[in-house]
Image (cartoon, rainbow, N blue to C red):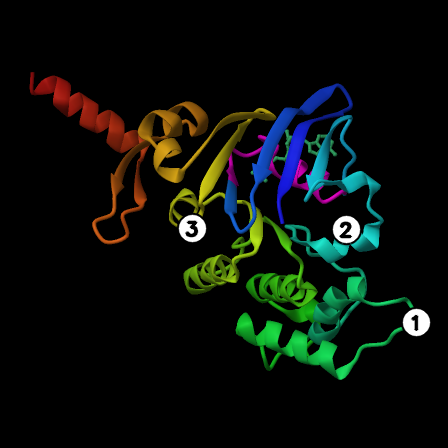
Amino acid sequence: MNMEANHLSLSIGAKKILDSVTLNVREGEFIGLIGPNGSGKSTLLKTVYRELKPDAGQVFLDERELLNLPYKKAAELMAVVSQESSVEFDFSVADMVLMGRYPHKKWYESDTEADRGICLRALETVGLGHFGERSFATLSGGEKQRVLIARALAQQAKFLILDEPTNHLDIRYQLQIMELVRSLGITTLAALHDLNMAAYYCDRLYIISEGRIAAEGTPAELLVPAVLRDIFGVHAEVNLHALTGKPVITYLPESFYNEGLKQTEESF
Ligand SMILES: Nc1ncnc2c1ncn2[C@@H]1O[C@H](COP(=O)(O)OP(=O)(O)OP(=O)(O)O)[C@@H](O)[C@H]1O
C-alpha cells in the first residue's frame, strides 16, 4: 500500500500547526517522522488517520482519497497505535485485541474461533500470550502499549501508523517492537523520538519543524551534526557503526561541549 499526503494544512485557533505538509510512504517502506516536541508529528499523524480534518490538502491510500472512504473501509486498510491509550471501560486484554477484528466484520457477526486465534497469536508476538484474561486497566504502561500493538497486528491492516510506539517500553521491548514492525514488511509511518532507533530501522526520514517538513532523506543523509544542532538544538557526534553500517549518534551535553571548547581554546 502507498500513502501520499499532499499539502496538508491545519490551524487550531489562530495557530498554524501544519503548513502544507507533503510526504509519501511507498509500499513496504518504514518511514520515520522525527522532530522536536510540539513540531506537529502527532497532529500530522492524526490528520492522516482521520482524527483531525485538515483545512486543506488530501491523503491518498493507493490512489483512493481517504476522506471519500467509509470509516470501516479506512480502518480495514490502516491500523493506528497512538499515544492516547486511555479506555473508558474496563476491557479484558483479549477484548481489546479482538477490537482489531471489527473492521473485518458485519455489525451482526460475532467473534469466531479464527478471530480468537489471530488475537492470541498477536498477543504471543508481543510477549503477552498469557495475558488475555487480565484487565487492560491494571496493566503497566509498557504492557498496555504492547496490547495496543497486538490489536494493530490483529487488524491485519496494510498500512500502519505508529505514534511513539516504544514510549513506555523498556529497552528489550523497544528493540523487539521495532524488530517486529520492521519484519512485518507492512508500509509504516512512525513518529519517533529516539533518533538512534530511527537511524537503525527506518528506510527514510521526514523531519518536521514548526509544522513544516524541513528535510527528507535517508537516516545517513539527515542525521548529521549540523541538522541535529539546527533542528533539535543539540551537539552530537555521528559515526557509522562498524558492524551495522548505520549512523550512531552520541549526544554531547552542553556542559561537556562548553568545557571541551574551553580546553581547545586554552591549548592554543
Ligand atoms: N487541540 C489543540 N489546541 C491547541 N494547540 C494544539 C492542539 N493540538 C496540538 N496543539 C499544538 O500544536 C503543536 C503541535 O503539537 P503535536 O502534538 O502535533 O506535536 P508533536 O511533534 O507530536 O509533539 P511531541 O513530540 O511533544 O509529542 C503544539 O504546539 C501543540 O501545543
From which residue to which does the magenta span run? Answer: 33-50
Judging from the image, what secondary structure is the residue with disc 3 in?
helix
Query: What is the spatial separation of the Cα atoms under label 2 and label 3, in whole angstroms?
Result: 26 Å
| Quadrant field for ligand 1 | top right
Label 1 environment density (alpha carbons within 10 Å; few <14, some 14–19, many ≥20): few
Q: Nearer the viewer, residue 135 or 198?
A: 198
Q: Quadrant of residue 26?
A: top right
Taking 46 as reference, is 221 above or below it?
Answer: above
Q: CA distance from mark 3 to mark 1?
A: 41 Å
Instruction: Estimate how packed mark 3 is, as few (under 14), some (14 to 19) or many (20 or more) residues with alpha carbons within 10 Å.
Output: some
Q: Residue at x 82, y 55 (%)?
A: 72
The C terminus - image quarter: top left
Q: Amino acid at mark 1?
A: Tyr
The residue type indicated by label 2 comes to Ala
- Distance between mark 1 and mark 2 Cα atoms: 20 Å
Q: Which residue occupies the foreground of this view, 246 or 18?
A: 246
**Residue that appears at 51% across and 48% down:** 29
Which mark is in front, 2 or 3?
2
The reply to whether dot 2 and dot 3 touch (C-beta < 8 Å) is no
Residue picked out by circle 1: 108
Earlier along the polypeptide chain: callout 1 or callout 2? 2
- The yes-or-no answer for disc 2 within 8 Å of ligand 1 is no
Name the residue rendered at 42%, 50% in the picture. Answer: 201
Amino acid type of the residue tagged 3 in the rendering: Tyr
* Residue 39 spot, x, y in % from top left: 57, 30
Q: Secondary structure at mark 2?
A: helix
In magenta segment, residue 41: yes
The verdict on label 1 being within 8 Å of ligand 1 is no
Q: Write down the residue under mark 3.
A: 201
Secondary-structure class at tag 1: loop
